[in-house]
Each structure stands twice: as structure tokens, then as C-alpha cells.
Image (cartoon, coloured by chain):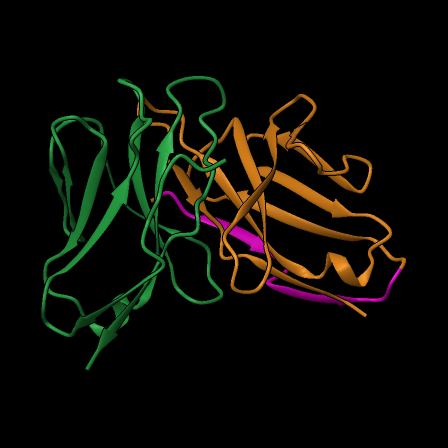
Amino acid sequence: DAKTTQPPSMDCAEGRAANLPCNHSTISGNEYVYWYRQIHSQGPQYIIHGLKNNETNEMASLIITEDRKSSTLILPHATLRDTAVYYCIVRPPSGTYKYIFGTGTRLKVLA
Amino acid sequence: GAVVSQHPSRVICKSGTSVKIECRSLDFQATTMFWYRQFPKQSLMLMATSNEGSKATYEQGVEKDKFLINHASLTLSTLTVTSAHPEDSSFYICSARVDTSVHEQYFGPGTRLTVT
């Protein structure tokens, strides 16, 4: 079973920040949080990952709460091309490092 | 970097035939690749973990004799759907794990299989 819970859908106005929450209350201390997105009929695209600290790259920012039980992916200036399903994944710390996908959040950016 | 390709991108086959799907890591070596299946409007479901030079590890409920996986080199894994039936019609996606301290996966573009 997936270790994450996300809202099924969200809308965001173009140009505004999109904040996508993820709950991972059972995360253990050495498990990473990964975010991917999937545009219709394509393979998932890596966005960002983090362990404890907040992270930022050219695509997004990841805010992880101090207790690590939840995180938020922030797209600072959403565009129509950001319309996709966003998946938050908790990756195990060892073994094959396999992903178990949850249901994700379907983000629709509105013009 | 970190590009994964799949071939074919879409395939239509008749019921009872077998179909092979290739997954290649183009600019890195991957000792581990993964195969997922995705039905319309659903999430990705992990089918199996493919390890170079050894047998694949299948998730519970996935028939290993129906979905044959071969990982013969560090850049190629193949999934063969044997004796395909219409219920096997789906979007099949592979990923390759980067062997660094982060162990992130990069995904292929997917293969749309339609069994008639």
C-alpha cells in the first residue's frame, strides 16, 4: 500500500503559485520523499526529492515539516503546461528502493 | 542526462499472441529497472523489479509466467506479455534506477498495448 495521501484534485490560476500537499505520517527517519508528475499518456517526470531539509530546484520547491509527517510541493508560477497528475512517493531506505504510487493529485491550471 | 526509452510506443496485437516491450537507459547504466502497468484514470501499479543478470522479482498478484522479464545488460530490460488477452490491454511503463546515493528512478515514455 502507498504510504502517502494526497487530495485527488486541485485547480490553480495561471501565474499563481500551486501548493500541493502530501501526508506521509508513517514515514521513517531515513525514508526520502520524492515528487513526480505525469502528463497525460506519458511516463512520470522527476521533479524534486528531499529528506529533512527544504529543497528548491529550477522546477519547484519542496517544504517538509519538521516532524516529516507531511510535505508541500510548490510550483511558484504555474503555467498551463503544469497541468498533470502529481505523485508524492516515500522511498524505502534500502533494498531495491522501489516506488509504490498512490493516487496522486490531478492539478489543473486555469487560464 | 538520465534518459530512458521504450519501444514500441504503441502496439496492437491479436489475442493469444506474445508482445515484447524494450526499455533502455540511454546515457547511464542501470542494474535495476522496474516495470509498471497503468489502466485508464488509475495510478501506476508496480509489476516487477528487474535486476541485471538475475531473475526478476514480481509483486504479489502478478503472474511471472505471463509477464516474462529479462534484464540481460546494464542498459536493457525487456517485458514480454505472453498469450495476450484483451484484459492485458494497458499502458506499460518502465523505469531505471540511478545507482547513486539518491537512487532516483527515471521513467520511459510508456508503451500502449491494445489486444484485440
Residue positioned 67% across, 28% down in the render: B56
Looking at the picture, does residue B27 appear above or below residue A69? below
Q: Is residue B100 left or right of residue B73?
A: left
In the rendered image, residue B14 lying in the magenta stretch gets the answer yes
Residue B98 position, x and y percent, is 40, 31
Q: Residue at x 20, y 28 (%)?
A: A68
Q: Colour of chain A?
A: green
- When asked about the image quadrant of residue B46, the answer is top right
Q: Residue A19: x and y, percent?
A: 16, 55
Residue A36 to residue B110: above or below: above
Region rendered in magenta = B2-15
Q: In the image, is A95 to the left or to the right of A14?
A: right
Residue at 64% across, 48% down = B22
Asked whether A37 or B70 is in front, the reply is A37
Total labels drawn: 0
Classify residue B27 as left or right of residue A13: right
**Chain B as rendered: colour:** orange
Quarter of the image that includes the C terminus of chain A: bottom left
Residue B55 in which image quadrant: top right
Residue B109: % across, % down: 49, 57
Q: Is residue B22 above or below residue B51?
A: below
Residue at horizontal 15%, vertical 74%? A13
* Residue ranking furthest to the right: B16
